Amino acid sequence: MRSGVPIYRDWYPMKQNNNKKIFNRKELKPRRKELRNNLTYAEVIFWQHVKDKQLDGRKFRRQTSIGPFVVDFYCPEEKLVVELDGKVHFNDEAIKYDKERTNYIESLGLRVIRFENNEVLKNTEYVLSKIRECFNKQ
């Protein structure tokens, strides 16, 4: 915070060299809204544990777009993307797509951590502890 004005460097639209907005592009707003309104059960459970800065005071956003992709959860303070993967992520095509997506996001200086939906549902505390381990490791 400078001069009484909060500075959210990690959340203001970052620009690529070609001046395109990176975070929450306007054309992806309907898709983000659709995804927020149709969360998987694992996403609902995870959100209940991280919303309102419940996880070590870190703010998480759900269904945020980064470039052309909509990610499940994003913690701007930690530059950390959390992806929860269901069955659709385990075929060869989806694995390749997820890898390309992760490479793109990491090229922006962000970190990506992935969990299977079952991990969130069956061992939420483990998932949260793994995320905590990522805090302050930028």
Image (cartoon, rainbow, N blue to C red):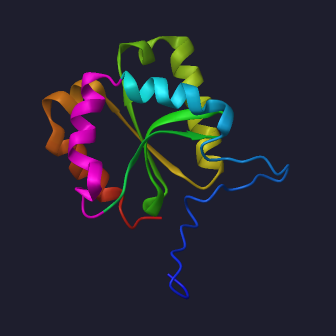
Identify which residue, 20 or 4, lies in the foreground. 4
Q: Which residue is drawn at 18% across and 43% down?
A: 126
Q: Which residue is drawn at 22% across and 56% down?
A: 54
Query: Image check: 25 left or right of 36?
Result: right
Dividing the picture into quarters, in which one does residue 7 lie?
A: bottom right
Q: Residue at x 58, y 67 (%)?
A: 9
Residue 57 position, x and y percent, is: 28, 64
Residue placed furthest toward the right: 18
Q: Is residue 55 magenta?
A: yes
The magenta segment = 39-57
**Image mark count:** 0
Identify which residue, 22 or 122, lies in the foreground. 22
Dividing the picture into quarters, in which one does residue 114 lie?
A: top left
Residue 136 position, x and y percent, is: 39, 67
Query: Image check: 66 left or right of 78?
Result: right
Q: Residue at x 58, y 33 (%)?
A: 29
Q: Image height check: is 133 above or below 20?
A: below
Magenta span: predominant SS is helix
Residue 26 position, x and y percent, is: 66, 38
Identify which residue, 123 or 27, lies in the foreground. 27
Query: Image check: 121 left or right of 107?
Result: left
Q: Is residue 23 magenta?
A: no
Query: Image check: 126 left or right of 84?
Result: left
Residue placed furthest toward the bottom: 3
Q: Image height check: is 98 above or below 123?
A: above
Q: Image height check: is 106 above or below 97?
A: below
